[in-house]
């Protein structure tokens, strides 16, 4: 529950522009997102500012990783809410509101530290979209944890240390991805350690599916590195622009 609540907050706060404080009876019209609307009993708040946030992910230490498309960088935000804070919030939620709606306002106030620190993990590569953290037993056995990131034409993997907040040892996984058109490259890993990379079409309607593809890279090819885009296994074709990929509990890939 801790990780889920924080992730929901993160999706809201990274695009906010002003402080919002909750109060008894709900949040009213005091929203941090200009022109936005939220369900009764929910409110948004400002966590920190980043340069054009594109994607975010959370590691096992609670750190929030964000792609700053405005700078082409991967940044890390901390500290996350502590376990003690979470327990206090849950205890107060039981007494704050009978129906539980207004309690989320209290929750978001606890999750708004004013001393958020930012660490630039990776810069200078034109990163523009996807983050993928791999802290699986498979990754740990091969030298991980790892973090995968993407630019318009390249997929990179770095050895990642969430405790020391460092990403190092750059490893090029895929190169020579066609540029132009839809420029984001969505990433996903399956339970066998295979990497999926999506590219979008050149325009809204392409005459051929040359660009609208989802390709798969084996774990062995990931380790070898420097895989040319044209040589990769085609997993699916004709997909206009899958800006998000994810596997469900049955192992089915959605985009």
Image (tube, rainbow, N blue to C red):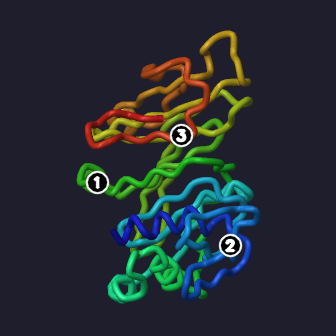
Q: For the residue labelled by badge 3, is the local secondary structure a helix, a strand or a loop? A: strand
- Residue at mark 1 to residue at mark 2: CA–CA distance: 38 Å
Point out the residue furthest to the top here.
207
Of marks 1 and 2, the one in the foreground: 2
Could you tell me which residue is drawn at 62 percent across and 85 percent down? Answer: 21
- Residue at mark 2 to residue at mark 3: CA–CA distance: 31 Å
Q: Position of residue 242 (x, y in %)?
A: 55, 34
Q: Position of residue 168 (x, y in %)?
A: 49, 60
Give the camera-side residue of 11 and 215: 11
Could you tell me which residue is drawn at 41 percent across and 72 percent down? Answer: 62
The N terminus, quarter of image:
bottom left
> Tag 3 or tag 2, which sits nearer the N-term?
2
Of marks 2 and 3, the one in the foreground: 2
Could you tell me which residue is drawn at 52 percent across and 41 percent down? Answer: 244
**Counting other residues with Cα less than 10 Å from the Cα at mark 1, is it few (<14), some (14-19), or many (20 or more)?**
few
Q: Position of residue 159 (x, y in %)?
A: 42, 57
Could you tell me which residue is drawn at 52 percent across and 63 percent down? Answer: 65
Which label number is shown at residue 186? 3
- Residue at mark 3 to residue at mark 1: CA–CA distance: 20 Å
Label 2 close to label 3 by CB (< 8 Å): no
Which label number is shown at residue 136? 1
């Amino acid at each position: 529950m801790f990780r889920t609540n924080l992730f929901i907050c993160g999706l809201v706060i990274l695009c906010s522009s002003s402080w919002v404080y909750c109060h008894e009876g709900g949040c009213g019209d005091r929203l941090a997102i200009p022109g936005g609307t939220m369900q009764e009993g929910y409110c948004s708040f400002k966590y920190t500012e980043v340069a054009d946030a594109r994607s975010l992910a959370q590691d096992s230490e609670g750190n929030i990783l964000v792609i700053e498309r405005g700078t082409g960088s991967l940044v890390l935000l901390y500290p996350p809410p502590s376990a003690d804070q979470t327990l206090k919030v849950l205890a107060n939620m039981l007494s704050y509101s009978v129906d539980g709606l207004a309690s989320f306002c209290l929750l978001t106030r606890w999750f708004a530290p004013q001393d958020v620190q930012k660490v630039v993990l990776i810069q200078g590569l034109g990163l523009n979209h996807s983050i993928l953290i791999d802290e699986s037993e498979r990754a740990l056995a091969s030298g991980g944890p790892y973090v995968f990131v993407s630019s318009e034409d390249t997929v990179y993997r770095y050895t990642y240390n969430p405790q020391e907040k460092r990403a190092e040892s750059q490893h090029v996984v895929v190169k020579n991805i066609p540029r132009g058109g839809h420029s984001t490259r969505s990433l996903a890993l399956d339970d066998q350690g295979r990497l999926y990379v999506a590219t979008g079409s050149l325009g809204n309607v392409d005459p051929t599916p040359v660009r609208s593809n989802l390709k798969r890279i084996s774990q062995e090819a990931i380790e070898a590195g420097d895989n040319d885009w044209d040589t990769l296994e085609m997993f699916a074709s004709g997909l206009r622009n899958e800006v998000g990929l994810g596997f469900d509990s049955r192992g089915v890939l959605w985009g």
